[in-house]
Image (cartoon, rainbow, N blue to C red):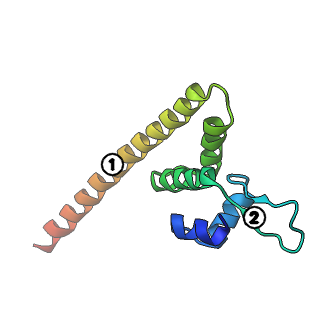
Amino acid sequence: MLINEVSKKTGLSIHTIRYYENLGMIKGLTNEKVTSNNYKNYDANTIERLEIIMEARQVGFTLAEIKKILTSWFESVDSKPETLELFQAKIKEIDDKMRYFKQTKSLLEKVCEKIQSNKD
């Protein structure tokens, strides 16, 4: 399928798909027999990769982390330990952020209480 079809199926812009391709996260294939255009064809694997990219971005993975996930998932023979390590690191990062945000919220609530008590 051509890039515009991929765009329609995934909801990603053509520009974004090309960006991911330039980063090496997906790969389109050109038909060697056709020399009159530079059209690339994308297969179902591309759609799967793009869906993984979108989901990983939603939960906070960086593009560099996502590239590692894609490499370990699709290109490594025994990817489970490496992929598990990446996911566990992200979970720890999320836990750290949650702790930070709870502390920040608590501090802001105390400031609000002080402001309200000074009002009265």
Q: Is residue 78 depicted above or below 61 in this figure?
A: above
Residue toward you, 40 or 83: 40
The answer to whether the residues at label 1 and label 2 have Cβ atoms under 8 Å apart is no
* Identity of the residue drawn at 87% across and 59% down: 32
Q: Position of residue 97 (x, y in %)?
A: 42, 47
Residue 95 point in image, percent of width and height = 40, 40
Residue at 54% over, 70% down: 8
Q: Is residue 2 left or right of residue 11?
A: right
Residue placed most toward the observer, 113 or 34 = 34
The residue located at (77%, 69%) in the rendering is 39
Q: Which residue, given by chain and number where applicable, does mark 1 sit on?
A: 103
Q: Amino acid type of disc 2?
A: Lys
Q: Secondary structure at mark 2?
A: strand
From what the image shows, is residue 15 above or below residue 105?
A: below
Residue found at x 51% / y 50%: 56
Secondary-structure class at tag 1: helix
Q: Which residue is mark 2?
A: 40
User: Which of the marked residues, 1 or 2, is nearer the chain's N terminus?
Assistant: 2
Of all residues shown, which one is farthest toward the left?
120
Q: Is residue 95 above or below residue 60?
A: above
Label of residue 46 in the image: none
Residue 80 image-quadrant placement? top right
Q: Nearer the viewer, residue 117 or 68?
A: 68
Q: Amino acid at mark 1?
A: Gln
Local packing at callout 1 (Cα closer than 10 Å; few below 14, some 14-19, many 20+) is: few
* Mark 2 closeness class: few <14, some 14–19, many ≥20 residues within 10 Å: few
